[in-house]
Image (cartoon, grey):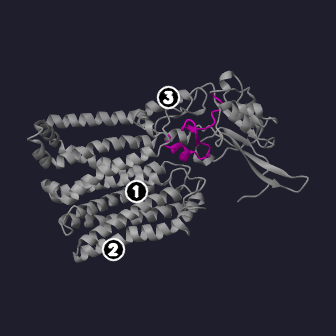
Amino acid sequence: MSAFHFDSLVWHWPIAIYLFLAGVSAGAMFFAVLLKHACLKDQAYRSGFVQAACIVAPIAVLAGLGILVLDLTKPFEFWKILVFYNPTSVMSLGVVVLMIYQVFMYAWIAITFRKPIEDWCRPRFAFITKLSEKLATYEASVTGLLIIFSVALGAYTGFLLSAQPRFPMLNNPVLPLLFLASGLSSGAASALLGGVLLKGNPTGKEVQFIHKVEIPLILGEIFLVFTFFAGLILSGGQSKMAAFTAIGEGFWGWVFWFGIMGLGLSAPLAMNLFMTATSKRKFSYVAGTACLSLLGVILLRNFILYTGQMTVS
Amino acid sequence: MENSRRDFLRRTCALVAGVSVSPFAVNGTTDAETEQAIKYAIVHDETKCIGCNACVEACRETNHVPEGVTRLSIERKGSYGEYPNQYYHFTRHSCEHCEDAPCVNVCPTGAAYIDKKTGIVSVHADKCVGCQYCLLACPYEIRFINPVTKAADKCDFCKETNLKQGKQPACVEACPTNALVFGNLKDPDSLIVATLKANSTQRNKQDLGTRPKLFRITAKPGEITL
């Protein structure tokens, strides 16, 4: 069986990229909120890492949606997805989640960067400062709902594939959890990478905080990957077959063991432990670790999408 | 403060109550559906099928299915046995018109739907945006993107063509050996009900809970698969 072309293949790599970008956006917003509330408070807008997360999140989600629209057979009729809804369709529910998520994402960014926005607007468009004042009174609700919807978005990327009784590997209750965890860690990585590129301090408290959260997150991901495949193998039948096709010999087996387990999970885990233990944090360490995490998540999305479609029940 | 807390609780309770009651509303309509008068199904008698593909061609012509794609195909396996007793095994591939259709469940716009009057799984071509979620979901792999309309397409028992004219579906009419029986499962006097009562039949992938309505009177397999 060829790695990229086989009979039961319907969804190709653009979907994997979309799932990756949606996860990055959700994760970046999740960590931006955590950074603001757990360590930066009112000074959040000054942090390169929060700035990076707030730039990455909207761009990633819009780019992902753009790819999704271009991948339709009728790209100019994408608006019908926004007009017609089907409550039993995970994709339709996902559209709702994506729309609401974006509203709270922009609202939260506006609240967090209220000071620079108001400073810039006051001499020019005074009415905007009134709007932002009003918006800031809802900060607690906006933050809470943003967290809920970013987690929902991260999990949705998994539910989209797991709602497929035809494919035993995709039709797996662990998949949404795995995609949520890896989405959050890709968001953290993109905030770190963007942050150091925006001249954020690689030894700053933001980096220490994110690394502290990332270590248990990566351990959790490894456990979820284990549970995912152990569950498939123990289910027997086509599920077991699907698991062995995916992680056994062949192109995708290499991607899994070397790319995902090695470069994507073990290497960043080791680097995070090393940086936490020695407190040696350099630009190259932080950026390199973040790049490996992101690579691992892109590979994971492609790996699950392709190998998931290889074995039918 | 006290008031706003009370308001908050009240609103939350209303929301929870609304959400928890809504599934019952949906169930209510499905109960009504089960009392529908027509539920179309098809039987493929593999013991009578000679693999002539007349059904495939008739379907293409009647439903204007473009070349390169098809709503219906006959898979041929074999040959088995020694001359002069050689034989093939034929399997029909076409929409199985599931009672609980994965394609309908996943369609984000409702373009894939089950016709309430007839139980036919069908497609609103202009509602379809071409996300191909249904192609992914269908366990029988019978959906395709129509290169002309760019919408997902599949067998609809000739709902828009022959059925409208009061005829049998094109494949059934074309079959020279009467290997196909089409009819209404709700009509106890119909040929299909008689056929299903008189023969042991199989349906594909029933373990997925799709409850398909393509029944097969299976021919001898010719080989052993474990």
Location of mark 2 (residue): A270
Residue at x 21%, y 56% (from the top left corner) = A50
- State the separation of the CA atoms marked 3 and 2: 56 Å
Q: Is residue A39 visible?
A: yes
In depth, the one of A202 and A104 nearer the eye is A202
In depth, the one of A239 and A18 nearer the eye is A18
Looking at the image, residue A288 lies above or below residue A28: below
B131 falls in the magenta region: yes
A55 falls in the magenta region: no
Residue B122 locus on image (x, y percent): 58, 33
Any mark on residue B29, and which? 3
Residue at x 29%, y 71% (from the top left corner) = A272
Quadrant in the picture for the N terminus of chain B: top left
Left or right: residue B111 versus residue B189 is left
Q: Secondary structure at mark 3?
A: helix
Residue B13: name its quadrant: top left
Range of residues picked out in magenta = B130-159
Judging from the image, mark 3 belongs to the subunit labelled B
Q: Residue furthest left?
A: A123
* Crowd tier of the residue under label 1, counting other residues whose Cα lies within 10 Å: few below 14, some 14–19, many 20 or above: many
Location of mark 1 (residue): A179
Quadrant in the picture for the C terminus of chain B: bottom right
